Image: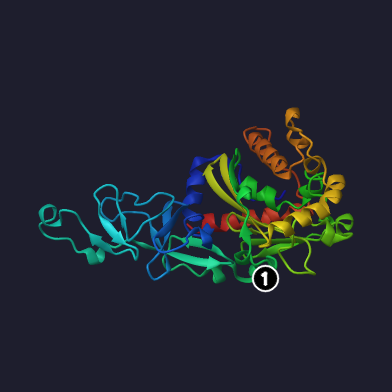
Amino acid sequence: MYHHLPVGAYTSQDWFDREQRLIFSRTWRFAGLVEDIEGPGHYISVQAGLNNLFIVMGRDHRLRAFHNICRHRGTQLIRAVGKTQKALTCPYHDWTYDLEGNLISVPDETSEFPDGVDKSCLGLKPASVDVWRGMMFVHPDPDAPTLAEWFGEVDPLLGPHKPEELVEYAEGRNSYEIKANWKIVVENYIDVYHLSHLHSNTLHMYDHAKAEYGWKGPHYHFWEPPSAEYAKDHEANLPMPRTIPEPHVGAWVPMLFPGIGIGASEESWNLFIITPLAPDLTRIENRTKLANVSDWAFQKQQWKSWGFWKDFGGAKYRGDDATGEDDPMASGDFTTEDIYACEQQQKSLKSPYLEIGPASVGESPITQHQKAVLAFMQDD
């Protein structure tokens, strides 16, 4: 037996609440891409466990992070994303802060607060913000270790991509919900064994038997080469222009703890952001970046590879419509297959007859992730 977590870790509200406090409130949280904040006054907020945080660019073009809490009555100051000209004003009583987090205005101060208000000690509570590979992260702790320290030795194993030099593919940005615990979603993501089975007709362009994977701290790294058929005339077979220089080939699919997946290949770079919503509900946000090339170069590569993918790619690439079959396994889409598998597994957790069997070698990453979860949960 390999399972290190009880069933309650996937179903219990109490366990879920403890995870929010002990894991997601104590680790770095992806907030957005650097281009999401274009100039002074632009801001973006994100939930990090029990904490709603926001990043704002100051007049000095410096990024700062704060807890999204007014120091008067605790009202959240801002919405998810937006822009302000010079200041941040609480909607409740109009207490106002500058872009550096200092309290600068209290309405009716003389009449409402006859003893005065010491604004110098009522600035917004700071959090940490750091940028890594063109991605912004926040941490509730203003003295958190840097991202370089957090990711540590896993960094060089995440692929040669430079996402800050790529451009976002707007149509590739989406979000959806999976009716399963966030750990089931992570475990599916890092399960090497299932690649050759659940995705036998959708991810067969890579040689799963030659996958290389492991752990650095709580972070999982993964790389696998293209299959022999895909590798023949590989440059012509790429569906889109290269995002990395030759001779780099393959798929890099790490999972950064606790739930930041990256799916990168020769021709694309993708983010897979996991947000737990409830013990049995998880939201996924996808963002995709491609090579910064002309429309003509993009179309030329697609035309060049069309014949290969028409024959090799399956129903999805041929344009076959399988939606009428109402069968996720006939969708020709590996994401649909994964969602189906995760939700079916979550349903089984309710059965008193559930008993987890032995783990394959390719499922060993699941064991390591569960150990990482336990390490945080026991540090209470």
Q: In the image, 259: left or right of 57?
A: right
Q: In the image, 378: left or right of 312?
A: left
Residue at x 63% of width, y 63% of height: 166
Q: In the image, 124: left or right of 46?
A: left
In the rendering, at what x and y percent does residue 350 appear? 62, 33
Residue 300, located in which quarter of the rendered image? bottom right
In the rendering, at what x and y percent does residue 128 appear? 44, 65
Label 1 Cα crowd, 10 Å radius (few <14 / some 14-19 / many 20+): few
Colour scheme of the picture = rainbow
In the rendering, at what x and y percent does residue 278 appear? 52, 41
SS at badge 1: helix
Q: In the image, 112: left or right of 316?
A: left
Residue at x 75% of width, y 49% of height: 359
How many labels were placed on the picture?
1
In the rendering, at what x and y percent does residue 226 appear? 82, 58
The residue under label 1 is 156
Closer to the camera in the image, 128 or 245: 245
Q: Is residue 3 visible?
A: no
Closer to the camera in the image, 182 or 40: 40
Closer to the camera in the image, 257 or 339: 339
Residue at x 62% of width, y 48% of height: 171
Residue type at numbered disc 1: Pro
Closer to the camera in the image, 256 or 183: 256
Q: Is residue 87 visible?
A: yes
Residue 239, located in which quarter of the rendered image? bottom right
Residue at x 57% of width, y 65% of height: 134
Residue 7, located in which quarter of the rendered image? top right
Q: Residue furthest front?
A: 296
